Image (tube, rainbow, N blue to C red):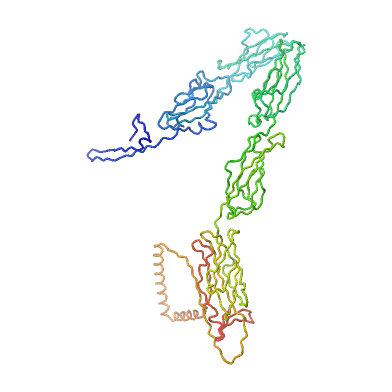
Amino acid sequence: QVTLRAGAELDARRVNQYTLSLRAACPGEEEVEERLFVRVTEGQVLRCDAPFASAGGDVVRVPVDVAPWMPLYAVLRQPLGGLTVSGSCPEFRLRNHDTPLRLTCQGLVLAPVSGFNPSKDTQTFRLEIEVRDRHGHNCSGTVRVEVLPSLRPRVTFLESQRDVVVPEGIGPLEVVTQVHATGDSVRYAILAPTVPTLFTIDEMTGEIRSTRRLEVAHTQLLVQAYNALHPADRATTTLNITVQGTDQRAPSCVPALFVSQVPETLSAGSTLVTLRCTDPASTEGCLHYALEGSPASLSHFHMEGPRLQVNTTLDYDSEAVAALGFQFTATIVVTTGGQPPRSTRVPMLVTVTPINEFTPACPSGAAFTVMETAAFGSVVGRVAGTDRDYPPHSLEYSLEGGTGPAQPFSIDTHTGEIRVVGPLDSQRHRSYRLTVRLTDTRNDLDPAQRRSSLCDVAVRLQAVPDQAPECTPEVQELRITAGAGGRQLVTRLACQGRPNSATLAYAIVGGNEDGRFWLEGNSLFYLPDDMAEPRTFVLLVEVWGSPGAPRRSTVVALVVHVTPRSTPVPPSTTAWHTTLRKEPLVVMQIEAAWHPPAWFVAVLTISGTLLLAALGCMAQSLLCSEQGQGLIAAFCSFCSNQDPGKLLLGRRGAGGHPGALSTLSHLSSAQGQFDGRAQDPRTGRDYLFNSVTGARRWI
């Protein structure tokens, strides 16, 4: 085992390779020496792990009763830490110091010295930590510590102080009010005054009753709730009990109910309403104004004397405001300064209305690829625009310039999906540049206030490899009578390219050595001449599509029988014997080569040898008998009656070249044996005949 010496430092820029000579020897054996090459590479940049360095940071949850100085989180865990440091020890620094948590030089986050405050339900602390090494490399991250309530429910009062107002004249042992605390095995007691003279409390239920008939007075009670099994778990609340006279009247305010709508752009410090309140029982007019409600309402509004003002910006586009239904409710409490204090409550409801502040944003790098053979309605891609205004996904999509031959696409108004609505051809257009308009909707109280932006979308066409054309039929036999004058139409080839939009080219590649035929597109013409005898031509026409390489083509075989126009022959006593000139027959044969493995050739050779031996033994036994001689004679008679003049055209694909003419095995020209053609009056069938020998052949 080779290890790095303690205290050694490696520097790849100074020395990037070390050669170590190692010697080893066993007792009684020769010493062996080998070399070990150690390559030193430059260290990686300081990195932080994904949860710690992410935008939201890492989250750790601890109970509220955790012990002081308890490690809560380790930025660098051992041995597989989330940080990767090359060649130095990292240094940890806390950027924000407004937290009771501590960060050690080893990267440990510790609980506060005095622990967490158990009176609070949920506490959250955010730590921004920077890690730096001696080479100046650094990375940073965030840790959010959420302090959760203890698993054991603690005794807690919902209100630390409460004002209770009761009318005078209440009799003894009547219920004045009741306190309630949460927890297990809760019991109640009055701590102050130590000897209560006006009120008593039920230990089990928390009901407070009067001990005698109440008169106008003001009393403060300190009530304690505790866990009977754990007396240290306790909480207190203060009750201010005021016994009012019958002529006490609360202040009156205008308006008695406040309802308003405000835009989200209303600046902080703006006044929403000014209350006009009066105290009918006092002329001093000393009134106190306070706001009661949810934490969200108290954070956005406050009272400045009788004026209700905005505390912070009312952001309609935030999730917090959306969770409240874009409405804030609270209560304005107006209290007199006399004894006992009297109060009036004014409910308020503020609705925030949206303002279209932001322009829709285009997606970055909107580019799609589609096959040029995509069917009508195929989805090309989706343009995902964004808008920071609420509600999200409230964009409408439209295509600038509309849909047409130059732009065979459409876009869904609501989803932004681009679809194919026209033919695509990669040879004409390799790509399309579309302009998509994003328009926001429902982002403003005024529907006419809309914003839009233009996005460039690139659609690239992916070409489909051309296939060999298809011709129907692939082998044709045609008969024409040569006429006088110009060229004569023989046939038109029915071929279709793949893809269908491909332009096809035609060429005669065989059988037209004397130039009697001419091709114009898919039309084949015959050029008449002074031919006096019928003649058969075998033409090979190659059809191909795009000019790219390799060229994919199909070969069509055309057998054309040309008969010259009949001409009158003057009478003569001289007997003319015409010897028909035999036309040379061109036979083209394209065969696929197959090279079988050696074992297959050996097996086939042995099998053939055994078969020939068996056939030889059978033939010998047949020749030695009379029955065998009769069979041989019958076989010879059958062979003499066979017709060798047959045309066999086969089409076989070879080498991935569809449409090629593979086999033209045998072609016998009829004009070399027969010099006439007629029709049988009984059957209606055509046949060829030889005027010299009288031989016939059915067609």
What residue lies at 40% left-to-right and 65% top-to-bottom? 601
Residue 520 place in picture, x, y as percent = 60, 68
Quarter where residue 561 is shown: bottom right
Please indicate, yes or no, whether residue 169 appears anywhere in the rendered image: no
Residue 137 position, x and y percent, is 45, 31
- Measured from the top left, where is residue 126 in percent x and y? 54, 26
Q: Position of residue 658 (x, y in %)?
A: 53, 63
In this view, which residue lies farthest toward the bottom?
573
Quarter of the image containing the N terminus? top left
Residue 163, quarter of picture: top right
Q: Is residue 102 above or below residue 374?
A: above
Horizontal side, residue 4 vs residue 271: left or right: left
The relative height of residue 216 versus residue 254 in the rendered view (above or below) is above
Position above or below: 205 against 54: above
Asked if residue 172 can be seen in this view, the reply is: yes
**Hey, which residue is sitting farthest left in the picture?**
28
